[in-house]
Image (cartoon, rainbow, N blue to C red):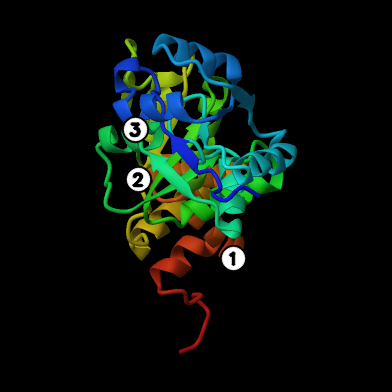
């Protein structure tokens, strides 16, 4: 190991507008011995735009397990390394944290060159509360993991920030509407670019705006956190509505989703009440959780 190990620099890069490339970012990228990039071709074009000639190596989800030991050896030899993603801050919703963690455990220096972040940019233009928020990255695509994550988000009181691909944004908005109820939300795409767009409203209205459109660019979804638990009267009304849907042949989950859209009460709360109390759920909730035939 060299007398002095190198430093790992986490360098933020533009998410669209090249004018957001800072002086310090350019200086660091031009001075380090190696740039670890999510996509070397994309980063190569960015560096060429600013006249930076740098040695690069790929580092992305899929090769990080082999790359971390390689990069650690480079750092041990005293070479500074810059880590960049395709856009925004590295280490956020990408495998960069594995390299950072390895450096921290070994006592190798880690520095940050802050830059643009799509998650933060979308949050601050959404119009939703910014004092407390949670970043969820990408939701699991299918199955039980996705269902469990949506159940967790239904209970989340902080503003929720998610990434999504253009082709899956409609499905994700539908799933969020079903699980969370019709909360305030925003969909941001192409942030800082020429065709930047921020669609604000409720989950149902935003879904209506994007359905049938061929969206392009990176998508960020911002959703309002859960408000105080629904008043018993609000929940009772929603459950009665859901029970009527069930009576006419709808499944409980579908009935809960439709009632949530109509009332704004979370579908999960409606479904739980239907599952626990059955067709009498609305009356039981109105009476404080006591069945009509229960004794005092």
SS for callout 2 = loop
Q: Give how far across and how far down residue 118 sits, in percent.
A: 39, 31
Residue 263 appears at what percent x and percent y?
A: 37, 45
Image location (x, y in percent) of residue 181: 43, 45
Q: In the rendered structure, which disc, 1 or 2, sits on the residue that comes first in sequence?
A: 2
Decide: few, some or many residues near mark 1? Use Cα within 10 Å; few <14, some 14-19, many ≥20.
Answer: few
**Tag nearer the camera, 3 or 2:** 3
Numbered disc 3: secondary structure? helix
Q: Secondary structure at mark 1?
A: helix
Residue at horizontal 51%, vertical 24%?
Answer: 86
- State the quadrant of the C terminus: bottom left
Residue position marked by numbered label 1 in the rendering: 276
User: Which residue is pictured at 32% across the width and 10% down the height?
Assistant: 194
Q: Position of residue 93 (x, y in %)?
A: 53, 39
Q: Which is closer to the viewer, label 3 or label 1?
A: 3
Q: Residue at x 35, y 45 (%)?
A: 224
Q: Label 2: few (<14), some or many (≥20) within 10 Å? A: many
Visible residue check, residue 239? yes
Examine the image and state in which quarter residue 23 appears. top left
Mark 3–mark 1 Cα distance, whole angstroms, equals: 39 Å
Q: Which residue is mark 3?
A: 122
Q: Single out the residue that lies furthest toward the right.
A: 66
Q: Which residue is mark 2?
A: 224
Residue 161, quarter of the rendered image: top left
Which is nearer the eye, 278 or 127? 127
């Amino acid at each position: 190991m060299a007398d002095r190990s190198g430093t790992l620099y986490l360098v933020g890069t533009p998410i669209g507008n090249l004018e957001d490339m800072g002086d310090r970012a350019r200086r660091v990228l031009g001075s380090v011995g190696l740039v670890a990039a999510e996509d070397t071709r994309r980063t190569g074009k960015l560096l060429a735009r600013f006249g930076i000639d740098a040695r690069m190596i790929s580092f992305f989800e899929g090769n990080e397990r082999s790359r971390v030991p390689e990069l650690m050896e480079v750092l041990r030899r005293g070479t500074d390394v810059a880590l960049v993603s395709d856009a925004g801050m590295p280490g956020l919703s990408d495998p960069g944290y594995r390299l950072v963690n390895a450096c921290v455990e070994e006592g190798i220096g880690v520095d940050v060159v802050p830059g643009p972040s799509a998650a933060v940019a979308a949050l601050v233009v959404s119009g939703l509360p910014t004092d407390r928020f949670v970043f969820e990255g990408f939701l699991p695509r299918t199955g039980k993991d996705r269902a469990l994550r949506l159940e967790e988000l239904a209970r989340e009181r902080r503003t929720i920030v998610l990434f999504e691909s253009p082709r899956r944004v409609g499905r994700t908005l539908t799933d969020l509407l079903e699980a969370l109820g019709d909360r305030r939300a925003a969909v941001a795409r192409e942030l800082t670019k020429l065709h930047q767009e921020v669609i604000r409203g409720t989950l149902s209205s935003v879904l209506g705006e994007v359905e049938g459109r061929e969206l392009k660019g990176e998508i960020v979804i911002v959703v309002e956190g859960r408000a105080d638990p629904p008043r018993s009267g609000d929940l009772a009304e929603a459950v009665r509505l859901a029970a009527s849907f069930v009576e006419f042949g709808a499944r409980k989950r579908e009935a809960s989703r439709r009632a949530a859209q109509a009332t704004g009460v979370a579908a999960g709360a409606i479904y739980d009440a239907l599952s626990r109390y059955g067709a009498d759920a609305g009356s039981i909730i109105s009476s404080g959780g006591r069945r009509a035939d229960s004794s005092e």
